Amino acid sequence: LMEYKEFTKAAEKLMQEKGHQLAALEKCVNKTDDVNMPVTLRCGDEMNAWNTSMIFTFCKVRYDAAVKCQKDAGENWASGCRRETTHMLACGDDAANRLYRYNLQRKSDASKS
Protein backbone atom coordinates (compact mmCIF):
# COMPACT_ATOMS: atom_id res chain seq x y z
CA LEU A 1 0.00 0.00 0.00
CA MET A 2 1.15 3.51 -0.78
CA GLU A 3 1.70 5.89 2.08
CA TYR A 4 -0.71 8.83 2.31
CA LYS A 5 1.61 11.46 0.78
CA GLU A 6 2.67 9.17 -2.06
CA PHE A 7 -0.95 8.20 -2.73
CA THR A 8 -2.09 11.83 -2.71
CA LYS A 9 0.63 12.83 -5.16
CA ALA A 10 -0.25 9.94 -7.49
CA ALA A 11 -3.98 10.71 -7.17
CA GLU A 12 -3.42 14.36 -8.05
CA LYS A 13 -1.45 13.36 -11.15
CA LEU A 14 -4.06 10.77 -12.14
CA MET A 15 -6.90 13.26 -11.82
CA GLN A 16 -4.99 15.88 -13.83
CA GLU A 17 -4.08 13.47 -16.62
CA LYS A 18 -7.03 11.05 -16.63
CA GLY A 19 -9.81 12.84 -14.75
CA HIS A 20 -11.70 13.13 -18.02
CA GLN A 21 -12.06 9.33 -17.99
CA LEU A 22 -13.70 9.40 -14.57
CA ALA A 23 -15.99 12.22 -15.73
CA ALA A 24 -16.99 10.16 -18.79
CA LEU A 25 -17.70 7.14 -16.58
CA GLU A 26 -19.80 9.20 -14.16
CA LYS A 27 -21.73 10.71 -17.07
CA CYS A 28 -22.41 7.25 -18.51
CA VAL A 29 -23.47 5.81 -15.15
CA ASN A 30 -25.87 8.71 -14.59
CA LYS A 31 -27.53 8.38 -18.02
CA THR A 32 -31.05 7.11 -17.77
CA ASP A 33 -31.43 5.92 -21.37
CA ASP A 34 -31.47 2.26 -20.39
CA VAL A 35 -31.51 1.84 -16.64
CA ASN A 36 -32.42 -1.84 -17.02
CA MET A 37 -29.08 -2.62 -18.66
CA PRO A 38 -26.28 -3.28 -16.14
CA VAL A 39 -23.74 -0.48 -15.83
CA THR A 40 -20.93 -2.90 -16.69
CA LEU A 41 -22.54 -3.44 -20.10
CA ARG A 42 -23.65 0.06 -20.98
CA CYS A 43 -20.51 1.75 -19.63
CA GLY A 44 -17.94 -0.97 -20.28
CA ASP A 45 -15.59 1.14 -22.38
CA GLU A 46 -15.58 3.97 -19.85
CA MET A 47 -15.08 1.53 -16.94
CA ASN A 48 -12.20 -0.20 -18.72
CA ALA A 49 -10.44 3.08 -19.51
CA TRP A 50 -10.73 4.38 -15.94
CA ASN A 51 -9.87 1.07 -14.27
CA THR A 52 -6.82 0.62 -16.49
CA SER A 53 -5.54 4.10 -15.65
CA MET A 54 -6.16 3.49 -11.96
CA ILE A 55 -4.43 0.07 -11.97
CA PHE A 56 -1.43 1.45 -13.89
CA THR A 57 -1.14 4.35 -11.43
CA PHE A 58 -1.51 2.51 -8.13
CA CYS A 59 -0.98 -1.20 -8.84
CA LYS A 60 1.55 -1.42 -11.68
CA VAL A 61 3.90 -3.74 -9.80
CA ARG A 62 1.07 -6.16 -8.98
CA TYR A 63 -0.29 -5.88 -12.54
CA ASP A 64 3.12 -6.68 -14.02
CA ALA A 65 3.53 -9.67 -11.68
CA ALA A 66 0.10 -11.03 -12.68
CA VAL A 67 0.79 -10.59 -16.40
CA LYS A 68 4.20 -12.24 -16.12
CA CYS A 69 2.73 -15.16 -14.19
CA GLN A 70 -0.06 -15.59 -16.73
CA LYS A 71 2.38 -15.55 -19.65
CA ASP A 72 4.68 -18.04 -17.91
CA ALA A 73 1.79 -20.33 -16.91
CA GLY A 74 0.39 -20.63 -20.43
CA GLU A 75 -2.88 -22.54 -20.49
CA ASN A 76 -2.77 -23.00 -16.70
CA TRP A 77 -2.86 -19.27 -16.05
CA ALA A 78 -6.24 -19.30 -14.27
CA SER A 79 -5.29 -21.81 -11.59
CA GLY A 80 -1.56 -21.12 -11.64
CA CYS A 81 -1.80 -17.38 -11.08
CA ARG A 82 -4.70 -17.09 -8.68
CA ARG A 83 -2.55 -15.47 -5.98
CA GLU A 84 -1.01 -12.85 -8.28
CA THR A 85 -4.35 -12.02 -9.88
CA THR A 86 -6.07 -11.81 -6.49
CA HIS A 87 -3.37 -9.46 -5.18
CA MET A 88 -3.71 -7.22 -8.24
CA LEU A 89 -7.51 -7.08 -7.91
CA ALA A 90 -7.27 -6.40 -4.16
CA CYS A 91 -4.85 -3.56 -4.89
CA GLY A 92 -7.30 -2.18 -7.44
CA ASP A 93 -10.18 -2.37 -4.96
CA ASP A 94 -8.11 -0.61 -2.31
CA ALA A 95 -7.02 2.07 -4.78
CA ALA A 96 -10.62 2.64 -5.91
CA ASN A 97 -11.78 3.05 -2.31
CA ARG A 98 -8.95 5.39 -1.41
CA LEU A 99 -9.42 7.39 -4.60
CA TYR A 100 -13.14 7.70 -3.92
CA ARG A 101 -12.38 9.17 -0.48
CA TYR A 102 -9.67 11.39 -1.97
CA ASN A 103 -12.11 12.82 -4.54
CA LEU A 104 -14.81 13.36 -1.89
CA GLN A 105 -12.30 15.30 0.20
CA ARG A 106 -11.17 17.26 -2.84
CA LYS A 107 -14.76 18.23 -3.70
CA SER A 108 -15.43 19.14 -0.06
CA ASP A 109 -12.30 21.32 0.09
CA ALA A 110 -13.23 23.02 -3.22
CA SER A 111 -16.72 23.85 -1.96
CA LYS A 112 -15.26 25.54 1.14
CA SER A 113 -13.12 27.93 -0.91
Image (spheres, rainbow, N blue to C red):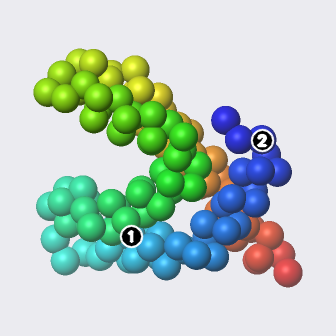
Q: What residue sits 36% from the left and 39% below the top?
A: 67
Where residue 112 sits, quadrant-wise, is bottom right
| Alpha-carbon span between mark 2 and mark 1 | 27 Å
- Give, as a three-letter code, the residue at label 1: Leu
Return the residue nearer the eye: 94 or 84: 84
Return the residue nearer the eye: 28 or 33: 28
Q: What residue sits 35% from the left and 29% below the top?
A: 69
Report whether residue 72 is seen.
yes
At mark 2, the secondary structure is loop
Mark 1 Cα shell of 10 Å, populated few (<14), some (14-19), many (≥20): many
- Give, as a three-letter code, the residue at label 2: Glu
Residue 44 drawn at (x, y percent)? 25, 62
From the image, tell me which residue sits under label 2: 3
At mark 1, the secondary structure is helix
- In the displayed structure image, the side of residue 82 where residue 76 appears, left or right: left
From the image, tell me which residue sits under label 1: 25
Query: In the rendered image of this protein, does residue 9 appear above or below residue 75?
Result: below
Q: What residue sits 16% from the left and 71% below the top?
A: 34
Residue 68 drawn at (x, y percent)? 37, 35
Where residue 63 sits, quadrant-wise, is top left
